[in-house]
Amino acid sequence: MSRQSSTFTTNSSPFQGKIQHDYGVYVFNESSMEKRLPPSTFKTIKKLLINGGSLTESEADVVAFGMKEWAEELGAVCFAHWFQPLTSKSAKKFDCFLNIKNGVSSHASHLMSEFSGKQLIKGEPDGSSFPNGGLRQTYQARGYTAWDYTSPVFVVKDQLGGCLYIPAVFCSIFGLSLDAKTPLLRSERALSSSVEKSLKYLGGSKGPIKCTIGLEQEMFIIDRDVYQRRPDLIACGRTLIGKRPSRTQQMKDHYWGAMPQRVLNCLDDVRDEMWKLGVPVCTIHNEVAPAQYEIAPIFEQAGIACDHNILLMEETQRIAKRHNLEVLFHEKPFLDVNGSGKHVNWSIFSGDEGLLIPGKTEDERRRFCFFLAAVIQGVDNHADVLRASVLTAGNTHRLGGFEAPPGIISIFLGDVIQTLIDSITNNTGETIEKKTIIDFHLEMLPKITRDQSDRNRTSPFAFIGNRFEFRAVGSEQNAAWPITVLNTVVAESIEQMVNQIEKNIHDGKSEKNAVDEVIKETILLHKKIVYNEDCYDNKYRKTMEINGIKEIKTMDMALDALSKSKEMFKNTTVLSEEEVNARVSILGEAYVTTSLIDINQLLDMVEREIIPTVMDVLAKEKKQTQIIGSSIINKRIENMLEWFNKMIFSIELLKEKRDKVINSSCVIEANEAMNVINEVRVYIDKLEGLIPQKEWPYPSYETLWNTHC
């Protein structure tokens, strides 16, 4: 008994062994900086991380030298400004720590290892091949990257021997944002500024304001050899054809079940590598669909969390290849089973105080109700823009399905918080029920406390106790963009509420009454965005339509919503009008281009492989029928011919629709063509069900899901 009590005297203890030795070993963190930098420079960096600002040229040289020395000890021979252009991936180029003495000699004896402060702070990539949305002309190729010192520098091994990665932002020669990170950092600043103003009237902690993010990354993992036999997976990231197997996820036995050993070994390596890179990966498990998995780290500040998520995706794909596996991040790689999301768990902190925690005292409760009301108002005002932020070519196949939120944004609060806001609007007093205890009525089992809110997995935006979960974000997306939009709508909302509080005080109300009145009026005006029931039910659409909440079904509707949000982005200084226009253009172009890739790939597979295969099988079976004379075989051939002819007809229709997509602005035409793809697939999948498996040219769903087992 005494041994047990000593074991459980504290809730936490320093890590021992492998984690303690490996965690952050590839990160130029505070510990590494303190060892490598002069005390005065180290103090300067710490001040910058708290207060902002910039380094002098001489200070940058000192920091760069310390970084290089540290990185070279880890085997790095080059560096790269690592940035996030307006695609779903990151970008970089490798430059060696190399110079030639006096710049003239070519003899090896005069080669020098060099990395300057100028190289650390500024890079100059060729901007001509990155999406720009009209922010530059074709001949204006110059672009700039700039070091984002708020995100840790790190070394990635196994790339040219080792490379020093410098997180950076990316802009045009005129300083206009061409990346996902710059607007995210601006949105964090806007949110921090508005929260700070509000706390003047709300009290509470006066620590730094930060937005924290936890990203749950879902993915599929399949055998690489089988993957390479599916040209649709290679080109499109998803299967364009594939008959539904008799068993998919109906038994619900894959979720949190035992993993295949090869996948387990792979994810074990991913976790170890992430720990070395300072990414706090904590949770790994099977997801609902066959061959589907999830990795989730602990919450981090928004900018760092997004960097770490991009790094996690890239390293997972790279490490998987060592195990002859392939990782699929597409939102809907397989039809008729769950797709993959990237659930964004979003919260706000002031110092160590969570501002979305209901709290126990009256002041804590008032702060919570204020920020809850601000979120409700922001989401209600800009539900269409939030929906637009997650509508990508891949996510259109997932959203609205039975496993993903539909095309309408609403908020789930749960019974307890709903009762709280009802009490505010009805003047019945702000009370929260005491926590409920769950008793198993077994003496060997503990009594556990029930949470004050449920987890509504059908809701696109759900409150889950101390944060909101934005479930609609796609797995392949860079989460920086939807988080930018969310931060911005809430920052604007808080600003509006603070302005009204100040007006109320000016009109003679006390601070407390001014705040309480704004909270009540805000909730009354915007509570129509709250929906606490099943969002998959048809009742949901009808209710939200009555409430005036628009359903954004297609990309053209999403782009229209984004186009109308310029004032919000401009007023919060997150994006200029030009930068919003650019994103509208880029998102439209990406949708059209992706759609055309899908269409052309399907046509290629049908015309080169499927049509010849079906014709061969038909010829064989007709010959067999002449010998056997079976009516059953005749019926089988009739079905095959019917579906074959319908497939040919729909293929011709698809070509007609494709040919109307004449440029990147043809979003509506691309959407119409994608609808025809679904018709073509119906007949192909029916034919796959009749063609012998050894004759069918592509691996089946069963093969794709089970080979790695």
Image (tube, grey):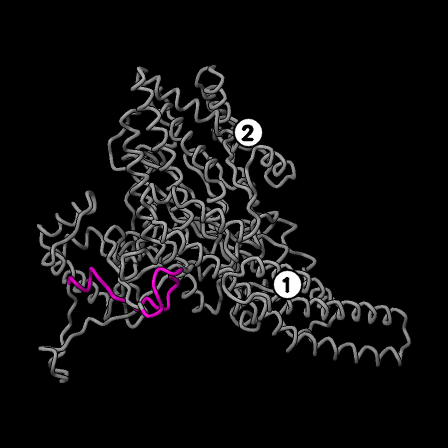
Q: Amino acid at mark 2?
A: Phe
Left/right placement of residue 49 relative to residue 660 reads: left
How many badges with numbers are in the image? 2
Q: Residue furthest bottom?
A: 107
Specify start and end residues of the magenta stretch as a single range. 117-139
Q: Residue at x 40, y 56 (%)?
A: 582
Q: Amino acid at mark 1?
A: Ile
SS class, disc 2: loop
Q: Quadrant of residue 568?
A: top left
Q: Quadrant of residue 623?
A: bottom right
Percent across and percent down for residue 97 are: 19, 71
Estimate the spatial distance between the alpha carbons at disc 1 and disc 2, rounded to whole Å. Answer: 52 Å
Left/right placement of residue 380 relative to residue 706 reads: left
SS class, disc 1: helix
Looking at the picture, tell me which residue is in the foreground, 19 or 394: 394
Q: Is residue 263 magenta?
A: no
Label 2 crowd bin: few (<14), some (14–19), many (20+), radius 10 Å: few
Up the image or down, 242 lies above or below 463; here it is below
Please give the residue where the numbered disc 2 appears in the rendered image.
440
Label 1 crowd bin: few (<14), some (14–19), many (20+), radius 10 Å: many
State which tag comes first along the sequence, 1 or 2. 2
Up the image or down, 607 lies above or below 12; here it is below
Percent across and percent down for residue 632 are: 87, 69
Q: Residue at x 68, y 70 (%)?
A: 652
Q: Residue at x 55, y 54 (%)?
A: 396
Figure quadrant of the N terminus = top left
Up the image or down, 431 lies above or below 23; here it is above
Looking at the picture, tell me which residue is in the foreground, 146 or 289: 146
Residue 470 visible in the shown view = yes
